[in-house]
Amino acid sequence: MPFSKKILEDSIRLGRIRAIKRTLYVVEFALLVALAIFFVFVIGDAALTPRLYLPIDEFLAVFALVLLVICVESFFFRILEIRFARSSSARHLMAKNSITHSLLLAVVAAVVTIVLMVPSVLAVAEDAAQKTVSVSSEDFELWTKDPLAIQRVSELRASCPDTVELYVVRDSDYVEYDGDVTDMYFQRINRDDYEVAGSLIIEMPVMEYALLHLVVNDLSSPGASVTVTIVYDTSENITGIVALLSMAFVVANVAWIAYLTPIEKKYAQGSIYK
């Protein structure tokens, strides 16, 4: 086969490979959009009122999985592109660029993995989200999750120098009974832990996105004020699935760099790119 004919055939194959890659990426992008709509609006019950709520914690797990699949696909396509490249210089440049990109991805994924999997690091973000409020005869409103469902209320730490009772009540019950303290006693979510005698920790159950009220029963200590620290933790979908997939990103890219390094060195000798 004449050399020019081989070059032409390789160029055609390379063009087809890149066209297939672009088409596949477009399809996967459309799939991601469809999955985002499904997980956020269908499963997640997203809402615009009374407060914007776009739960993306479950979608982030799927998004990370699809990105990992695309990453592995890119390795396969790069192998084909290197194989059908027209010169040693082109092969060397492809391998070198891929190593650089994979190194960057591995570093970013490693940082994400550390943030999500190392408790002391994750605690910094959760501590930053904590909020301390003062609750008295006027109740305080709070939502069970943030608008993106990345964090949820995990516990309430209450303190008061006097002995009072603190009730956590759903908004529907609060409205139905018009905030009557006596009725709130029977509607409270914290069935066991409600008496504040110095300090109290209320463990919050995992709940759907909802508006809650903190109601203080100060009949035994009129005018008493309760200091409440709202503690948040990160969604298990993010600290679990996303963290594991992020670690898989690191492993995949490090393995890819190890595979490409000998190839890059092989073609570096006859390459015009240094």
Image: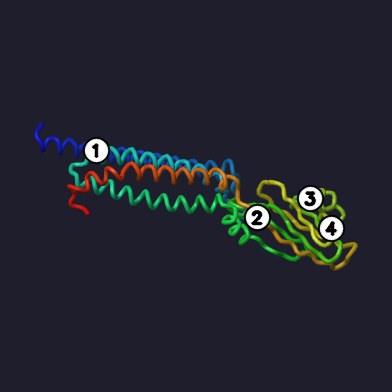
Tally of marks: 4
Which residue is nearer to you in this view: 257 or 38? 257
Q: Is residue 144 left or right of residue 8?
A: right
How many C-alpha atoms fall within 10 Å of the one at disc 3: few (<14), some, or many (≥20)?
Answer: some
Q: Nearer the viewer, mark 3 or mark 1?
A: 1
Please give the label number shown on residue 265.
none
Q: Earlier in the sequence, mark 3 or mark 4?
A: 4
Q: Earlier in the sequence, mark 4 or mark 2?
A: 4
CA distance separating discs 3 and 1: 65 Å
Q: Are marks 2 and 1 in contact (CB under 8 Å)?
A: no
Amino acid type, label 1: Arg
Residue that lies at the very extreme toward the left in this rendered image: 2
Per the image, the residue denoted by label 3 is: 190
Residue 128 spot, x, y in % from top left = 61, 62
- Give the residue displayed 37% in from the left and 42% down from the top: 25
Amino acid type, label 2: Tyr
Amino acid type, label 4: Glu
How many C-alpha atoms fall within 10 Å of the one at disc 1: few (<14), some, or many (≥20)?
Answer: few
Q: Nearer the viewer, mark 4 or mark 2?
A: 2
Residue that lies at the very extreme toward the top in this rendered image: 1
Q: Earlier in the sequence, mark 3 or mark 1?
A: 1
